[in-house]
Image: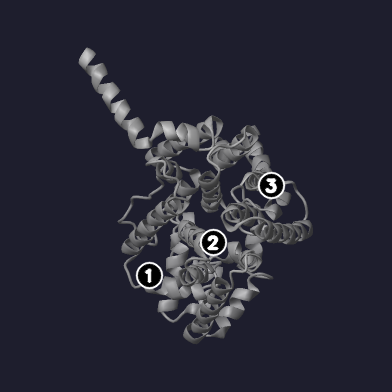
């Protein structure tokens, strides 16, 4: 028995050494925030084990794969490859090959995204999803590398085991890739303007976060990155028109007023975290929702401009990332990694946080996990209503944390 305990103590010592536990306790926000992060990691690990939702099914075809968003990207690329690009934004035709679980899938990305998805469609579906899965894993790793926390293996473990990573991987979304490109570009736009501009141009295939990025670049006077991103994005658009024709762009634009994009906004989703969706969950009209979404976009744009003008770059980036998430007109749980990235960048600059920020940031870190646990507890009843109201107030929590981070950085800058 004594030898058993000696082995267990040795294993524990090795485990703590790998995680760099002492440094983690002092330099990962603080004990309250670490409690939220560790709790989240344990719960998400259990989800990967018990509810992988076909993540590791590498044999299923388009017609029988479980719930998976990558199907929409692959299907769009396949239609473009077959010369049927005019059907990409037609929901009835678009979903014909899908299983019943995926009949609600839509292609909502701009047509120049087809320049990326069409080549993927030349691969068998099973191989294409492996490529995207590996790209997502590398992107999550890259987000932590950009933060450069120097805390051993712990930040990588915690970020891979946040609900945003889980949701992205089981649905096989491309959000981790796009978020990595944005974070990399904003952090490195001065030192690496060409790569940053290219990264932002590619990130426009998922354009909702990019609405306010130009404001940040202009406020920071990052002229080279701004113009490289603008020119390359314009080149992508022109190339897509030459490759697929102008009508597909006309179809895409029409979706915002009377097509799939409009119905997507009007419907209320428990996992959609935007101001417009929040008001929908509180039973306000569509006109109120649209007006509020535009208003918060303007207000957050002003906040990003102010933060970028009054803070140095290293302080401005995480504040603006959080504000971009709060202002986004489309933000689901698989986009939550932009929240995680923002908080990791805060940790790089201020390793020890005041208690109020530890609590609010910890609640934000774990919020999607709590919400979906409440929602999955039953389709009716108190838990579903609790999930609905929690979801409705999450954009407000994002804004509160953004303000707290800004005030923390202003205080930090005054000491330097």
Number of residues whose C-alpha sits closer than 10 Å to that of mark 3, classed few (under 14), some (14–19) or many (20 or more): some
CA gap, disc 2 to disc 1?
Answer: 28 Å
Q: Which residue is mark 2?
A: 186
Front residue (pair 285, 327) = 327
Q: Position of residue 343 (x, y in %)?
A: 55, 46
Mark whose residue sits in front, 3 or 1: 3
Q: Secondary structure at mark 2?
A: helix
Which residue is found at the position 32% from the left and 61% from the top? 126
Q: Secondary structure at mark 1?
A: helix
Which quadrant would residue 46 be assigned to in this image?
top left
Q: Position of residue 344 (x, y in %)?
A: 51, 47
Which quadrant would residue 324 be assigned to in this image?
bottom right
Q: Which residue is mark 3?
A: 403
Number of residues whose C-alpha sits closer than 10 Å to that of mark 1, classed few (under 14), some (14–19) or many (20 or more): many
Residue 67 appears in the picture as rendered: no
Front residue (pair 60, 213) = 213
Which residue is found at the position 38% from the left and 74% from the top? 119
Q: Which residue is mark 1?
A: 120
CA gap, disc 2 to disc 3?
Answer: 19 Å
Residue 54 left/right relative to 406: left
Check the image and name the residue furthest to the left: 3
Residue 147 appears in the picture as rendered: yes
Q: Secondary structure at mark 3?
A: helix
Q: CB under 8 Å between callouts 2 and 3?
A: no
Number of residues whose C-alpha sits closer than 10 Å to that of mark 2, classed few (under 14), some (14–19) or many (20 or more): many
Residue 360 left/right relative to 302: left
CA gap, disc 3 to disc 1?
Answer: 41 Å
Residue 285 left/right relative to 132: right
């Amino acid at each position: 028995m004594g030898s058993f305990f000696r082995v267990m103590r040795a294993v524990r010592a090795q485990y703590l050494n790998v995680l760099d536990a002492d440094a983690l306790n002092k330099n990962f926000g603080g004990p309250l925030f670490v409690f939220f992060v560790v709790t989240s990691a344990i719960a998400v690990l259990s989800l990967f084990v018990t509810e992988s939702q076909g993540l590791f099914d590498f044999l299923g075809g388009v017609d029988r794969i479980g719930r998976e968003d990558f199907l929409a990207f692959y299907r769009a690329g396949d239609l473009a490859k077959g010369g049927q690009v005019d059907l990409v934004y037609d929901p009835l035709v678009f979903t014909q090959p899908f299983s019943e679980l995926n009949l609600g899938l839509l292609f909502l990305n701009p047509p120049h995204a087809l320049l990326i998805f069409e080549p993927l469609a030349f691969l068998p579906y099973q191989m294409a999803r492996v490529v995207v899965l590996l790209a997502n894993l590398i992107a999550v790793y890259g987000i932590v590398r950009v933060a450069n926390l120097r805390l051993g293996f712990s930040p990588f473990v915690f970020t891979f085991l946040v609900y945003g990573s889980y949701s992205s991987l089981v649905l096989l979304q491309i959000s981790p890739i796009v978020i990595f490109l944005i974070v990399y570009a904003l952090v490195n736009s001065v030192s690496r303007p060409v790569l940053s501009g290219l990264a932002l141009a590619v990130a426009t295939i998922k354009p909702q976060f990019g609405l306010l990025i130009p404001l940040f670049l202009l406020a920071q006077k990052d002229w080279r990155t701004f113009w490289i991103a603008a020119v390359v994005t314009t080149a992508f658009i022109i190339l897509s028109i030459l490759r697929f024709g102008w009508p597909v762009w006309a179809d895409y634009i029409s979706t915002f007023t009377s097509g799939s994009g409009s119905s997507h906004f009007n419907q209320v989703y428990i996992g959609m975290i935007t101001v417009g969706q929040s008001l929908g969950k509180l039973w306000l009209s569509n006109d109120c929702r649209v007006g509020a979404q535009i208003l918060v976009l303007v207000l957050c744009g002003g906040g990003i401009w102010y933060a970028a003008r009054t803070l140095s770059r290293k302080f401005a980036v995480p504040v603006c990332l959080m504000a971009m998430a709060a202002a986004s007109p489309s933000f689901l749980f698989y986009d939550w990694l932009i929240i995680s990235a923002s908080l990791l960048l805060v940790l790089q600059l201020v390793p020890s946080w005041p208690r109020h920020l530890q609590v609010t940031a910890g609640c934000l870190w774990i919020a999607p996990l709590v919400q979906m646990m409440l929602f999955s507890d039953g389709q009716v009843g108190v838990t579903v209503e609790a999930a609905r109201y929690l979801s409705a107030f999450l954009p407000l929590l994002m804004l509160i944390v953004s303000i707290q981070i800004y005030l923390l950085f202003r205080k930090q800058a005054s000491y330097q």
